[in-house]
Amino acid sequence: MLTGFPSPKEALVLSLLTEHGDLYGLQLVGFAQGKLKRGTIYVTLGRMQDKGLVRVLHDSDAESHAGMPRPRYRITALGSRALHAAELAASTLNPSRSKA
């Protein structure tokens, strides 16, 4: 279960999933514009899954390509609430950020 707020990387992943919908790990890296790295995204997503912030979706058309099925990630209701709480806390602690 979630304890505390999401880390800055987790909050970034949650905001990207909120903005773009279900995404693959490497799509998250691309949308993050250098703020997430290929070498750590799956570790971060695994930790987020353990916390209940995201869930994994497996492509139903796995037979159409060779290799392992690629997981996509979807924000959960808990993830949405955690992101909202983190954004609210950030805007309360640093009001100038919310005026951008």
Image: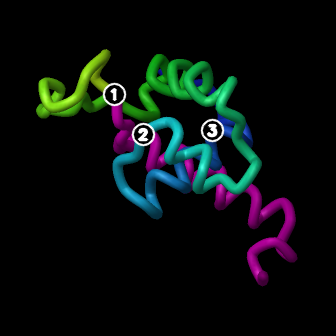
Depth order, front residue of 29/19: 29
Say which residue label 1 marks.
70
Question: As shown in the figure, which amino acid type bears the numbered disc 2?
Answer: Tyr
For label 3, count other residues whose C-alpha is less than 10 Å away and answer few (under 14), some (14-19) or many (20+). Answer: many
Q: Residue furthest bottom?
A: 99
Residue 12: x %, y % from top left:
64, 49
At 46% from the left edge and 63% from the top edge, which residue is drawn?
Answer: 19
Q: CA distance from mark 2 to mark 1?
A: 7 Å
At 60% from the left edge and 51% from the top edge, which residue is drawn?
Answer: 30
At 77% from the left edge and 64% from the top edge, which residue is drawn?
Answer: 92
Say which residue label 2 marks.
24
For label 2, count other residues whose C-alpha is less than 10 Å away and answer few (under 14), some (14-19) or many (20+). Answer: some
Q: How many marks?
A: 3
Helix, strand or loop: magenta stretch: helix
Contact (Cβ within 8 Å) of mark 3 with mark 1: no
Q: CA distance from mark 2 to mark 3?
A: 15 Å
At 53% from the left edge and 55% from the top edge, which residue is drawn?
Answer: 16
Q: Is residue 61 left or right of residue 11?
A: left
Residue 61: x %, y % from top left:
13, 33
The boundaries of the magenta stretch are: 71-100
Question: As shown in the figure, which amino acid type bears the numbered disc 1?
Answer: Arg
Q: Is residue 99 left or right of residue 27?
A: right
Using the image, determine if residue 100 lies above or below residue 22.
below
